[in-house]
Amino acid sequence: MHFTLEVLPNTRRFFKSTLENFSLEDLNKIPAGFNNNIIWNIGHIIVTQQLLTYKLSGLSMMLNDELVAKYQKNTKPEMEVTQAEVDVLKALLFSTIEKTKEDYGFGLFKNYQEYTVSTTGNTLTNIEEAFQFALFHEGLHLGYVMALIRVIKG
């Protein structure tokens, strides 16, 4: 199994714990000086992982177009998220990684469309590089969520 796919569930446990331990109001709160909120960051890491792995491999993603449009790069929270959507995102935290592990094991990620990421300027040329970048990306957003938590908790 690819090491990164073993690490990703660990970062996602942090996000799951955040969803379980903060109110819907806190998950939706955008503190002064921030462009987004906790729930947007969590939705964004799920969508980005699917785009970087499945979409760029020419495979069907586990997400609907509405979620992708709401949480992809260059978006921001436009309205408050409901508890029902929080529950959907919570379920996707682990189901997407488990399915990715399974599909990687079956060798489904054969073709990969090169993609240059705006964050670092690196060009991803294969699925292994996409996995590595997804882990970096999730760590980055874990840091954003930690900062948001500090501000929200006061």
Image (cartoon, rainbow, N blue to C red):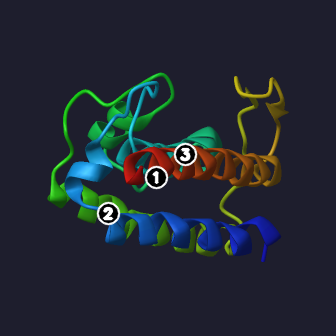
Provide residue 130's location: percent of width, then percent of height: 74, 47
Indicate left or right for 24 with 130 as reference. left
Q: Amino acid at mark 1?
A: Ile
Residue on which the image places disc 2? 22
Q: In this rendering, does residue 60 appear at all?
A: no
Residue on which the image places disc 3? 147
Between residues 152 and 103, which one lies in front from this camera angle? Answer: 152
Q: CA–CA distance between discs 3 and 2?
A: 14 Å
Regarding mark 3 in the picture, which secondary structure is present there? helix
Circles 2, 1 touching at the beta carbon (< 8 Å) = yes
Q: Quadrant of the N terminus?
A: bottom right
Circles 1, 3 touching at the beta carbon (< 8 Å) = yes
Q: Residue furthest front?
A: 154
Disc marking residue 59: none
Indicate left or right for 7 with 68 as reference. right
Indicate left or right for 106 with 36 as reference. right
Q: Classify mark 1: residues with Cα within 10 Å, few (<14), some (14-19) or many (20+).
A: some
Among numbered discs 2 and 1, the one appearing first in the sequence: 2
Q: Amino acid at mark 3?
A: Ala
Provide residue 89's location: percent of width, then percent of height: 34, 59
Between residues 130 and 91, which one lies in front from this camera angle? Answer: 91
Q: Is residue 104 above or below residue 74?
A: below
Q: Amino acid at mark 2?
A: Phe
Residue on which the image places disc 1? 149
Instruction: Report the number of discs.
Output: 3
Q: CA–CA distance between discs 1 and 3?
A: 5 Å
